[in-house]
Amino acid sequence: MSKPVQPTESIEQLLEIMRALRDPDTGCPWDVAQSFETIVPYTIEEAYEVADAVERGDIADLADELGDLLLQVIFHAQMASEADLFTFSDVVGKINAKMIRRHPHVFGDAKARSTGAVKGMWEDIKASEKQAHRVNMAETAYLDEVPRALPALMRAVKLQNRAQRVGFDWDDVSPVFDKIREEIDELEAATRQLGTDDQTRQDQEAELGDVLFAITNLARHLDQDPEVALTNSNNKFVRRFTYIEKQLAADGKTLQEASLDRMEKLWEASKSETG
């Protein structure tokens, strides 16, 4: 019988654990069966778990979730190593080099240290890196550098910001409101279409997407993060709906037993009670 493995705080042990899990003969069948494509959803999920722990202020959980996210990095690196593409050391080396390169004001001779100057320097260095990357790659479109796998709301902001850098943007917020009204009118017209065929649904989906894209543009012009704004509204909805549920429970009723009129009255009451 083999001796039980005792956990340590060593990154080398974590790398060895992943190698063992991926061993074709003695590893975990689930881990062995994974690929870059199948693991990506878990990588994204773990990043959201980190964000959730931060939002809740749960520091103990944050340490745990960061460990889960680190495991995803090591998982990808192990699969790459098996295919002779790159190793975990390559990943570490690349990020070390990038951080040193992008912070000449810390690791080099650059003098500018104000927040504004540093931000501008960071953007200039990133731009030069991307230009060099484009020279070494097949020709790509300007917006291709915004990853397609980003959540739609985040990708919309990045696409709009990138277009703004070359002057494709309104100078103030007023036309954005006009655009939103225009898109809502088109969505309303699409919902009046008769029938339930695929084309009707596709038209409605397209117009709904245009409304969401325009609202995202408004958030950008107001210097607001639409993801944060929607998250706050989600949380507000949960608080108010939970208030309804608790008030009904105090009356001996369930959500299923309550009338819509009763729930709407409790909803209005929840606004002053829960914010």
Image: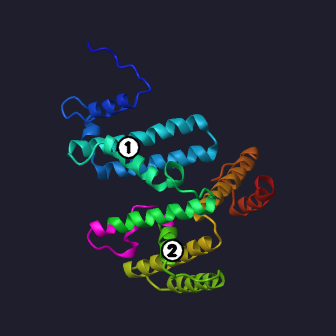
Residue at 54 percent of width and 54 percent of height = 105
Which contiguous range is marked in magenta?
A: 134-154
Residue 223 drawn in magenta: no
Density class for disc 1 (Cα within 10 Å; few <14, some 14-19, many ≥20) is few
Front position in the image: 65 or 145: 145
- Please tell me which of labels 1 and 2 falls first in the chain: 1
Mark 1 vs mark 2, CA separation in Å: 31 Å
Three-letter code, disc 2: Gln
Q: Which residue is mark 2?
A: 160
Where residue 95 appears, as percent x and y from the top left, is 41, 48
| Colouring style | rainbow
- Whether residues under marks 1 and 2 lie with C-beta atoms below 8 angstroms apart, the answer is no
Residue at 39 percent of width and 51 percent of height = 41
Q: Which residue extends farthest left?
A: 25
Say above or below: 193 vs 5. below
Where residue 194 appears, as percent x and y from the top left, is 47, 85
Residue 148 visible (yes or no): no
Q: Which residue is mark 1?
A: 92
Residue 150 drawn in magenta: yes
